[in-house]
Image: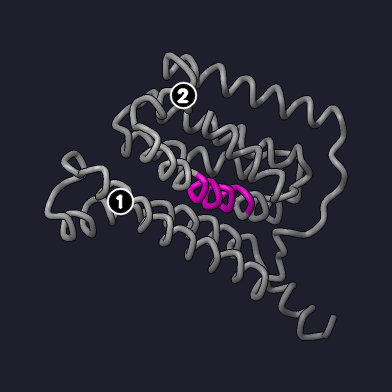
Amino acid sequence: MTKIDVVEIKKVSGLSFFLLALCAFAGVATEMIHVLFTMPVIFGASGDDWTTAQTIIHWIITCITWGFITFVLVRVADRKFQFDLFAKSDKVKLWQWITVVIGVVFTLAVSYNNWNGFKIVMEYHNNGWLLFIFQYIYYLVETALFTLIIVFGQKAFEIWFKKENFPYGGVLVALTWGLAHVLTKGSLQIGLFGALSGFLFGTAYLLVNRDIKKTFVILFIMFII
């Protein structure tokens, strides 16, 4: 490592990572721009009147937008702040896996109660196989972005508070992406469940020792069930 690298690392502050987390949240929010402005201009109709093809086009455009933002944020974290999200982590212990499974089961139970059934099954029946496929591709990319809120938020607050055993990233994603569902879904209950899920997501990130690959898979499973 060169002297220049050392100087650059020392300049990285909690605020830098916090801003990255906010950028990830802003990235998620870009969908609302497409819903309210881009798509109505292209389709000449609001979301409630979209055809199946138009809904799929919207999801594709949103996924491209989210994918680009995800790529840029990961690259900035790595190149500018020397933060490698894919760095090797410690082996996950049995008790950690057990705790993760408990969290997944709890999320499943709450989701089942909210949906009056399994979410993934209900959405398949409601949307049909074509919309279902594209919707879950959309969920996949969304998971990548809210994972970044957790990762960057966690790093920011660890720098500020000098402690690493609390899911700060989970709290941040709960207060942003989670509660935002109150507005996007028009339901306080869904928003509160989103906030609770966000906190559990942040906890899962710590339980798998910040392994981004394991985190992504676990969070996607928790999100779609």
Region rendered in magenta:
140-151
Q: Is residue 143 magenta?
A: yes
Query: What label sits on residue 93 in the rendered view?
Result: none
The Cα atoms of the two marked residues, 2 and 1, are separated by 26 Å
Name the residue that disc number 1 marks: 32
**Vertical placement of residue 84 versus 178, above or below:** below
Quadrant where the N terminus lies? bottom right
On the picture, is 154 further left or further right than 46? right
**Vertical placement of residue 87 versus 216, above or below:** below
Q: Is residue 75 magenta?
A: no
* Viewer-closest of 67 and 8: 67
Residue at image point 82% right, 56% down: 88
For the stretch drawn in magenta, what is the main secondary structure? Answer: helix
Query: What label sits on residue 121 in the rendered view?
Result: 2
Question: Which tag is nearer the camera, tag 2 or tag 1?
Answer: 2
Give residue 172's quadrant in the image: top right
Secondary structure of the residue carrying numbered label 2: helix
Residue 10 at what x, y percent from top left?
Answer: 74, 72
**Vertical placement of residue 156 versus 181, above or below:** below
Question: Is residue 176 something one can see in this rendering?
Answer: no
* Viewer-closest of 176 and 64: 64
Residue at image point 65% right, 49% down: 154
Identify the amino acid type marked 1.
Met
- Circle 2 packing at 10 Å, graded few (<14), some (14-19), many (20+), is few
Residue at image point 16% right, 46% down: 46
